[in-house]
């Protein structure tokens, strides 16, 4: 079984079906892409996976363990971490404090002996925010805010990292650096799930891609398979070829 | 059976009043998003006005009713909307809450100003002289019949108005999306004015109907609407039919408890508290809300307090206590001394509300628990009782955290208000009872209970001056504790939780544990404040710790700045130094003083960072100017010396205390500005023309191009046609 296994997830909001029998999987050591047009249900799926939204039907497994009925907190402690498309930073705190909150939380429940302050310093170095470490996150541009959210996730030492449009708000050179960071995270053994509109980024870092449209998975496969898939082309370009 | 019917009618007529009041509350909440804590107070004012016109001046009933319900109440509602509520769009829940609480306090103050308490103001019921209507097995009074009839009319009227008429539909549209409904031609301002007019009139109807059944007393009448709140919560503040249903449940519960509650000395309070109990229970069974992310970008910002700043603050507070002890007469020490224990209660709000974003309107109830523990366990002045006061209050605080896991914002505010009411009206009034057969508790002995002065280090601190210093030291220590929390792990965690519970949960934070912890700490601090307060008062009564006092402390701390220890000092100083001081300085204004806490809240609630942060900005230059600081300290010390030598009186002393720091701050600001100018000259920037005006205000020069190139990092080009860009 995969590291993260989502099977048969259905979400209904009143009469609307936001997710319909969604099936995706993520393996350790690779970046799995999740793409789809706006409103396809990508963020909703993340909410279901992390436990912020209970699904109407379906199961989530993390490391062979059913987590569907667990709280977001418990799931996080089992190794899930996510970033938010709309940014959920602790705006009154500095970059360092934001990451420190997460490191402290981990220190609180795990048996790690590491000093949270050192963990935070390493992460800041890794995400390249040493220069702004003590600035309030409110004062940072969006691209850097997304990196802070990523850093906060890393402080929880996740097994699965769910990234919701982490590159939006970054410029081209930042994205190149970011892609490198993603590859190195996956190489360290993490399973990364990437929701992203920057198709170039997705195709360059992902080994597998799932395509979501109107709440259904319409294609899954390697980037090259996806790029030639009829259903995908139809969803994105509206052609019927 | 007759008895059952009789109490059904009693219950239904109460239900009718609650339904009318609650429907007004729901109406204003849904159309404007503001939960109006002062809604009941509007009904209270209407009841007083009705008494004034009908019974004091003896005007005919129809004229009174038309004037109050048809003219004064709607106008008052419109006034509220225009002056206060309109400015609250897009502010945080806490700010809205503080403003409406302040409004409540203001209206209570206004009622007590116009109709001084302590005078009996009887009101007779409608058609009191007519015989009751015979319904076969039972009878119904005209007043009851009219009350029930009015509620039915209101229900039908609202139903028709909201579904058939244009303005009603506009109101409902405004609920869903004000800007969208504005785009479709509705006028949100007019709609919300109408809603406030209608809502206030409904409150007035309820107030006039309920007043003859109870004593005309401003605070209790204003808070009677806890019952109406309970009804509104049944409808989740949205649904009018469910609100009516809730009103019937609350009313009938009250009615049947009146009729069937076993005759026993412990339970009468339960009937009085029953709406609050119901409110609490309903809040508990409300469906669990989803974890929320960041709702609105908050304007709040509370900087990290420095260790040096905190120590200075603590030192100044202790020094202040000593100065007050040595300069005030004993009666004044009794009055002003309360600022420190109440300040500690206000401090308890800082980690809870300021850092953690949890709202509590029952801090004085925790203080009351601390005071009781002090009274019972502190006999002979045993200081260990202080520890017990903290622990017991913290334990009760943890209990309150249980619903808090599920509630937030306005619901948490209502839950804690309900808890305060339950304590107020029932628990604190209990007679002596035996717990588990082995220990007797006689809380307030159904009246007041004496508290022994503290006895430490072989001395009994029964002198108000010494107690004042103890209070100041305790306040300073708790301030340091709060600063330590802010600077540490817990503080970061609380601020994170306030910002985004969703993010905290997905990082693996135990939100429940965090809330439990902060509620316990906060309640413990309040308990300590209450215990010290009790030793200063020497006898305590349950009304020392009632909901209205909690509301005052809450509102003033937010006004001062809920995120910093200075805000708590502000609350203490305002309530127990500034207000009495104004009363002493201007005896003619003493009756107006009651309006002040509310008035400041209404005005200042809009700046979420509070008054203290503004003051701090003003005094900030002092920190950078050792000479001004030194001169100020010396001047203050000299002033104090003069006062001790009795060379000057207290008024000169107070004026000096205010003027000297202001002058020092002004001097520091001036010298800082002067320094800046010198620095600017040293850096060789005589020209301050903004870049975009260069070439217009003065011609381009080669130096400008060079500076621009340097800033942009572009290579310097040798020959640029300057003449092309600048005026020749």
Image: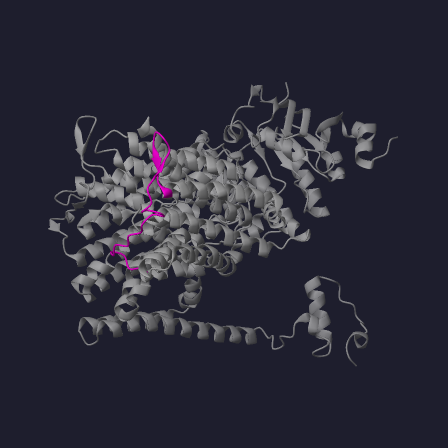
Q: Classify the position of the C terminus of chain B by image quarter.
A: bottom right
Is residue B135 located in the magenta-colored stretch of the structure? yes
Residue at the extreme bottom: B728
Toward the viewer: B406 or B649? B406
Q: Classify the position of the N terminus of chain B by image quarter.
A: top left
Toward the viewer: B146 or B31? B146
Q: Is residue B431 visible?
A: yes
Is residue B29 located in the magenta-colored stretch of the structure? no
**What percent of the width, then of the height, locates residue B191?**
58, 53
**What percent of the width, then of the height, locates residue B681?**
56, 76
Toward the viewer: B648 or A3? B648
Q: Is residue B330 left or right of residue B504?
A: left
**What percent of the width, then of the height, locates residue B706?**
71, 70
- For residue B310, which quarter of the picture? bottom left
Q: Would you place residue B649 above or below residue A41 in this image?
A: below
- Stretch of the chain drawn in magenta: B115-142
Identify the residue shown where x is 14% and y is 48%: B457
């Amino acid at each position: 079984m995969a590291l993260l296994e989502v099977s048969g997830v259905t979400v209904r909001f009143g009469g609307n079906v936001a997710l319909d029998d969604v099936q995706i999987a993520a393996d350790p050591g690779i970046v799995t892409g999740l793409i789809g047009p706006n409103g396809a249900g990508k963020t909703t799926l993340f909410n279901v996976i992390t436990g912020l939204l209970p699904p109407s039907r379906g199961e989530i497994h993390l490391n062979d363990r059913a987590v569907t009925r667990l709280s977001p907190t418990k799931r996080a402690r089992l190794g899930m971490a996510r970033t938010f498309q709309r940014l959920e930073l602790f705006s009154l705190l500095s970059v360092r404090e934001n990451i420190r909150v997460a490191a402290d939380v981990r220190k609180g429940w795990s048996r790690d002996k590491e000093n949270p302050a050192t963990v935070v310093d390493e992460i800041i170095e890794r995400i390249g925010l040493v220069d702004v470490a003590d600035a309030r996150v409110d004062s940072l541009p969006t691209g850097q805010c997304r990196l802070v959210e990523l850093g906060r996730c890393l402080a929880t030492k996740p097994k699965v990292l769910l990234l919701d449009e982490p590159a939006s708000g970054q410029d081209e050179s930042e994205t190149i650096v970011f892609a490198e960071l993603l590859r190195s995270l996956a190489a360290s053994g993490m399973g990364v799930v990437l929701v992203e509109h920057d198709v170039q980024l997705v195709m360059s870092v992902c080994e597998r891609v799932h395509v979501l449209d109107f709440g259904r998975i319409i294609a899954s496969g390697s980037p090259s398979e996806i790029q030639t898939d009829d259903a995908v082309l139809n969803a994105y370009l509206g052609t019927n070829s | 059976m007759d008895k059952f019917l009789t109490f059904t009618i009693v219950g239904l007529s109460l239900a009718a009043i609650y339904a009318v009041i609650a429907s007004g509350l729901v109406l204003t909440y849904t159309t404007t998003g503001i939960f109006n804590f002062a809604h009941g107070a509007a009904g209270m004012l209407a009841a007083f006005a009705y008494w004034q016109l009908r019974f004091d001046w003896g005007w005919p009933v129809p004229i009174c009713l038309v004037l109050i319900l048809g003219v004064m109440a709607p106008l008052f509602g419109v006034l509220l909307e225009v002056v206060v509520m309109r400015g609250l769009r897009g502010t945080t829940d806490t700010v809205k809450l503080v403003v409406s609480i302040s409004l409540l306090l203001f209206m209570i103050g206004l009622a007590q100003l116009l109709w001084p308490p302590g005078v009996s103001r009887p009101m007779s019921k409608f058609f009191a002289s007519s015989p009751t209507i015979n319904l076969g097995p039972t009878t119904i009074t005209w007043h009851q019949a009219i009350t029930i009839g009015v509620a039915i009319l209101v229900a039908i009227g609202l139903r028709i108005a909201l579904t058939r008429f244009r303005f009603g539909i506009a109101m409902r549209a405004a609920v869903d999306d004000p800007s969208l409904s504005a785009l479709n031609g509705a006028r949100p301002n007019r709609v919300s004015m109408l809603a406030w007019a209608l809502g206030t009139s409904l409150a007035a109807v309820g107030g006039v109907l309920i007043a003859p059944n109870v004593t005309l007393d401003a605070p209790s009448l204003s808070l009677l609407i806890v019952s109406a709140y309970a009804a509104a919560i049944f409808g989740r503040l949205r649904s009018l039919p469910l609100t009516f249903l809730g009103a019937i449940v609350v009313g009938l519960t009250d009615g049947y408890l009146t009729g069937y509650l076993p005759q026993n000395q412990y339970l009468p309070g339960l009937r009085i508290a029953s709406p609050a109990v119901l409110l609490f229970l309903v809040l508990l069974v409300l469906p669990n809300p989803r974890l929320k992310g960041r709702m609105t970008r908050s304007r709040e910002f509370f900087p990290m307090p420095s260790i040096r700043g905190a120590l200075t603050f603590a030192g100044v507070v202790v020094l202040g206590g000593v100065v007050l002890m040595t300069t005030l007469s004993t009666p004044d020490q009794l009055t002003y001394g309360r600022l420190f224990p109440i300040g500690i209660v206000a401090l308890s709000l800082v980690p809870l509300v300021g850092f953690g974003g949890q709202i509590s309107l029952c801090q004085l109830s925790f203080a009351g628990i601390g005071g009781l523990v002090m009274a019972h366990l502190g006999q002979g002045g045993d200081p260990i009782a202080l520890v017990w006061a903290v622990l017991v209050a913290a334990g009760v605080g943890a209990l309150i955290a249980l619903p808090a896991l599920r509630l937030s914002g306005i619901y948490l505010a209502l839950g804690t208000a309900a808890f305060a009411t339950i304590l107020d009206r029932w628990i604190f009034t209990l007679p002596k009872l035996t717990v588990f057969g082995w220990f007797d508790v006689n809380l307030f002995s159904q009246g007041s209970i004496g508290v022994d002065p503290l006895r430490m280090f072989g001395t009994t601190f029964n002198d108000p001056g010494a107690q004042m210093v103890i209070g100041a030291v305790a306040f300073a220590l708790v301030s340091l504790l709060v600063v330590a929390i802010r600077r540490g792990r817990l503080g970061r965690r609380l601020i994170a939780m306030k910002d985004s519970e969703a993010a905290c949960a997905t990082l693996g934070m135990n939100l429940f544990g965090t809330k439990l912890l902060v509620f316990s700490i906060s309640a413990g601090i309040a308990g300590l404040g209450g215990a010290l307060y009790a030793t200063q008062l020497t006898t305590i009564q349950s009304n020392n710790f009632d909901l209205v006092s909690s509301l005052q402390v809450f509102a003033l701390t937010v006004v001062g700045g809920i995120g910093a220890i200075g805000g708590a000092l502000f609350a203490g100083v305002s309530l127990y130094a500034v207000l009495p001081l104004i009363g002493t300085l201007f005896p003619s204004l003493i009756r107006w003083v009651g309006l002040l806490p509310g008035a400041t809240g209404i005005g200042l609630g809009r700046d979420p960072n509070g008054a203290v942060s503004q003051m701090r900005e003003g005094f900030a230059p002092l920190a950078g100017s050792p000479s001004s600081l030194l001169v100020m300290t010396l001047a203050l010390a000299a002033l104090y010396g003069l006062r001790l030598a009795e060379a000057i009186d207290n008024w000169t002393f107070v004026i000096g205390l205010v003027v000297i720091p202001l002058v020092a701050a002004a001097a520091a600001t001036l010298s800082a500005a002067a320094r800046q100018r010198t620095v600017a000259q040293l850096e060789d920037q005589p020209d301050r023309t903004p870049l975009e005006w260069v070439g217009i205000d003065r011609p381009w020069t080669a130096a400008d191009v060079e500076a621009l190139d340097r800033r942009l990092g572009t290579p310097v080009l040798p020959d640029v046609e300057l003449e092309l860009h600048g005026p020749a």
